[in-house]
Image (cartoon, rainbow, N blue to C red):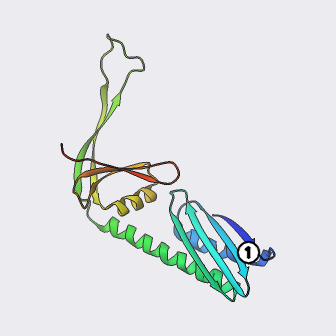
Amino acid sequence: MKCSVTFRHMKTSEPIREFVQERVEKLSRLLDRKGEALVTLSVEKYQHEAHIELVTDGSLRLRGSDRSEDLYASIDAAVDRILKQLKRYRSRLQKQRERPASGRELGHRVLEVPEHIHEDVPSPKVVRTDTIVARVLNTDDAVMQMDLLDAQFLVFTNATSQEVNVMYRLPGGQYGLIEAHPA
């Protein structure tokens, strides 16, 4: 995992940088995906502040910060806060995996469309037909599932409305939601 350490209002220190990188490596082993750690260390009067933000390629963001009189203790406390978030995230994913796959079965067809459509060219033909299960999820779990799978979109059955929804990734780390309602 790439680790960027920024020192504010204090001199750059290689031993501190190495200490931070060791602690971030501990987190990256649990994270099982690529990402970047943005670490900001600062001093204000006698208080040392450590702010750590982990950003993964699946747009998962975990943040932890702490302020104390000891810089090393602040770093450890910030890492511990991220560790708690990460464990909570992983346990939610585990609970999702343990749940039986319930949801609606939806037909999925892959079409072959000719490059140039003329009057004498036949219409698109079906190349492959599959069935997917739109699992029952709430929107928070759908976002987490997209992060886990690093997917651009996810078809699911909304746990609240029991309707089929499509969540998709927008530029800038935001998400869009298409809700299908009966006519």
Closer to the camera in the image, 140 or 45: 45
Task: Name the residue: 24% across, 45% down.
Answer: 106
Name which quarter of the figure residue 92 lies in: bottom left
Residue 13: x and y in percent read 80, 76
Relative to 61, 90 lies left or right? left
Residue 132: x and y in percent read 28, 47
Residue type for callout 1 = Glu
Residue 110: x and y in percent read 33, 34
Task: Name the residue: 74% across, 78% down.
Answer: 16
In the rendered view, tell whether residue 79 sits above or below residue 2. below
Relative to 61, 68 lies left or right? right
Relative to 5, 63 lies left or right? left
| Total marks in image | 1
Q: Mark 1: few, some, or many residues within 10 Å (few <14, many ≥20)? A: few
Residue occupying the far front of the picture: 45
Name which quarter of the figure residue 111 lies in: top left
At numbered mark 1, what does the secondary structure look like: helix, strand or loop? helix
Task: Name the residue: 62% across, 66% down.
Answer: 37
Residue 6: x and y in percent read 72, 69
- Which residue is labeled 1 in the image? 18
The quarter in which the N terminus is drawn is bottom right
Task: Name the residue: 53% across, 69% down.
Answer: 62
Closer to the camera in the image, 164 or 30: 164
In the rendered view, tell whether residue 119 sits above or below residue 14. above
